[in-house]
């Protein structure tokens, strides 16, 4: 169990640029989640994948955000035309299939700073 | 609406003192409950979970939590605080149903431990 891996750990970019983050879940985990955490707040759900299928998206996920999990393994989260309000920690989590009481295992996150 | 509330954004204790971090949720059915800890610039680490069965749950690092359905609470305790317990703690809830296992987090409680 190598844990959930996220890349990059930090991303600094200018407003209006596009950014892409990658998440590698624990290998046997079919479920993958993205959350966003702003300073002083708890994580907020963005989207969920069961294998390669994106099954739920939060209304927080505007049309500038897109997430993929093409082969049911790693996932990418892209933000187009970044805005100041996108500055946050983006967390990825994965869990085993089965009942939804399976705990989610989190990566260390990607911290995005918009200049 | 389903929600999670952590009472007290900051808790300060002396080393060796009791730690009590409060979490209440709002739901008409018993949910799945989790506590996570977050150290600076890191992701979330699972401390413990309640799904079914015994209402007193033991976790890592000497923490435990008790699910009280009548009070819709899941408070986290540790008999004797250690300096290494200083971190931010999040209560998280999976409300089940069509939530696909997504977690709803409280706003977090920062625990400070004084020597």
Image: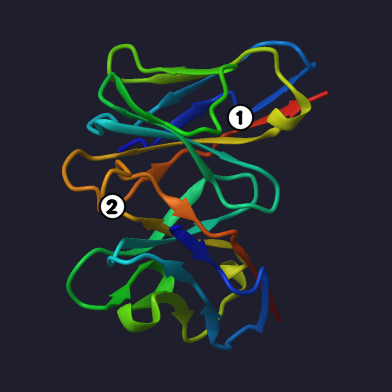
Residue at point 71% right, 18% down? A82
Mark 2 vs mark 1: give the one in front: 2
B78 vs A114, left or right, is left
User: Closer to the camera, B58 or A77?
Assistant: A77
User: Number of marks in the image?
Assistant: 2
Local packing at callout 1 (Cα closer than 10 Å; few below 14, some 14-19, many 20+) is some
Where residue A27 sits, quadrant-wise, is top left
Residue at point 35% right, 63% down? B33
Q: Are marks 2 and 1 on the same chain?
A: no
A113, above or below B115, in the image: above
Query: Which quadrant holds the C terminus of chain B?
Result: bottom right
Residue at point 66% right, 82% down? B13
| Residue matched to label 1 | A9
B105 vs A56, left or right, is right
Where residue A114 sits, quadrant-wise, is top right
A11, above or below B53, in the image: above
| Residue matched to label 2 | B96
Q: At which x and y percent is residue A6?
A: 50, 28
Q: Which chain does tag 2 point to? A: B
Residue at point 16% right, 43% down? A98
Q: At which x and y percent is residue B58?
A: 32, 74
């Amino acid at each position: 169990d190598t844990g959930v891996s996220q890349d990059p750990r930090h991303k600094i970019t200018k407003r209006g640029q596009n950014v892409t983050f990658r998440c590698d879940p624990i290998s046997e985990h079919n479920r993958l989640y993205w959350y966003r955490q702003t300073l002083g707040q708890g994580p907020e759900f963005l989207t969920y994948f069961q294998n390669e299928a994106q099954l739920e998206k939060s209304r927080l996920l505007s049309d500038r955000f897109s997430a993929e999990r093409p082969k049911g393994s790693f996932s990418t989260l892209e933000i187009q035309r970044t805005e100041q309000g996108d500055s946050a920690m983006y967390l990825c989590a994965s869990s085993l299939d089965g009942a939804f009481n399976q705990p989610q295992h989190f990566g260390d996150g990607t911290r995005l700073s918009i200049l | 609406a389903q929600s999670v509330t952590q009472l007290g954004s900051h808790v300060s204790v002396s080393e060796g003192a009791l730690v009590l971090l409060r979490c209440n949720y709002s739901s008409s059915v018993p949910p799945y409950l989790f506590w996570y800890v977050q150290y600076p610039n890191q992701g979330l680490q699972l401390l413990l979970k309640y799904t079914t069965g015994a209402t007193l749950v033991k976790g890592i690092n000497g923490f435990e939590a008790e699910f009280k359905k009548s009070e819709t609470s899941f408070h986290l305790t540790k008999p004797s605080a250690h300096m290494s317990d200083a971190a931010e703690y999040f209560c998280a809830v999976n409300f089940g149903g069509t939530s696909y296992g997504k977690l709803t987090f409280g706003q977090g409680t920062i625990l400070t431990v004084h020597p």
